[in-house]
Amino acid sequence: MALAPAFVVVLAGGTSRRLGGVDKTALDVGGRPVLVRLLDDLAGLPLVVVGPRQDVGRDVLWTREDPPLGGPLAATAAGVATGLSEHPDARVVVLVAGDQPFAGTAVASLRTALGPDVDAALGAGPDGRPQPLLAAYRLAAVRERLVGDTHGRPVRDLVRGLRTVTVPVAPGTALDVDDAADLETARRLARQDPARRPRTADRPTLPLSPPQGPAR
């Protein structure tokens, strides 16, 4: 079955207080910055990066929420608006946090999990918690949630009430670089396999929420 047309929004504009305020997306992991490593695994899909411009070695669309540092929902709204302006036929948006160096390997499984009765497919690491910033969403189900004042609102507002499934992903795939320990883990994974591409038998599990009528 052909996958619905999609683009990816990467959120890369947050702060990194637990890493001393450095740009964690620029930190080296196995010879490549975190963001570059992520974007390399996302090659083949249109890419929108929400955050300060930097050299990532490929063509991407750049945007920022206004005002900057408005939180992940505001950044998502800015990214989706930019993506749709260039790709109006898209039916799906994949959201990924820019500090997840290995998350790109989950995108195909997330898109595949969007069955006809599913609005969002959310990745979940070993702790089993669904991650709204490692997820694929049907645009018809979320566009109205991204209009108006999104500044400071939690990204969970994007998911609330949707028909969702979880997609288990490998620990390395779900890793986000929040602190020094996470950074060392990412570097260790990259040393073990310089072309690090975590693999897992990703598959949807039981819905997190029951169907609530036809998709919007």
Image (cartoon, rainbow, N blue to C red):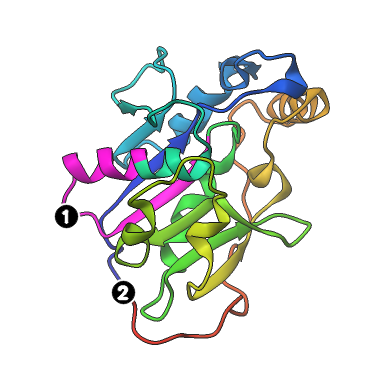
Q: Secondary structure at mark 2?
A: loop
Q: Residues within 10 Å of mark 2 (few under 14, many from 20)?
A: few
Q: Amino acid at mark 1?
A: Asp
* Rendered position, 36 above or below 75: above
Residue 19: give x, y in percent of width and height.
Answer: 74, 19
Q: Is residue 104 in view from this perspective?
A: no
Would residue 72 appear left or right of 205 to someone viewing this image? Answer: left
Give me the C-alpha separation between circle 1 and circle 2: 16 Å
Residue 104: give x, y in percent of width and height.
Answer: 50, 42
Q: What segment is highlighted magenta in the picture?
A: 78-97
Residue at numbered disc 1: 89
The extreme front residue here reads 149
Q: Which quadrant of the rendered structure holds the N terminus?
A: bottom left
Of discs 1 and 2, which sits in the foreground? 2
Q: Residues within 10 Å of mark 1 (few under 14, many from 20)?
A: few
Q: Amino acid at mark 2?
A: Arg
Residue 206: give x, y in percent of width and height.
Answer: 62, 80
- Which residue is drawn at the image coordinates 58% and 30% (left, top)? 195
Q: Is residue 10 in view from this perspective?
A: yes
Q: Nearer the viewer, residue 73 or 55?
A: 73
Q: Nearer the viewer, residue 28 or 143?
A: 143
The extreme right residue here reads 181
Residue 210: give x, y in percent of width and height.
Answer: 54, 85
Do labels 1 and 2 touch, CB within 8 Å? no
- Which residue is drawn at the image coordinates 17% and 39% (left, top)? 86
Q: Nearer the viewer, residue 167 or 77?
A: 77
- Which residue is drawn at the image coordinates 63% and 16% (left, top)? 27
Q: Secondary structure at mark 1?
A: loop
Q: Which quadrant of the rendered structure holds the C terminus?
A: bottom left
Asked if residue 142 is among those painted magenta in the image, a careful observer would answer: no
Residue at numbered disc 2: 216
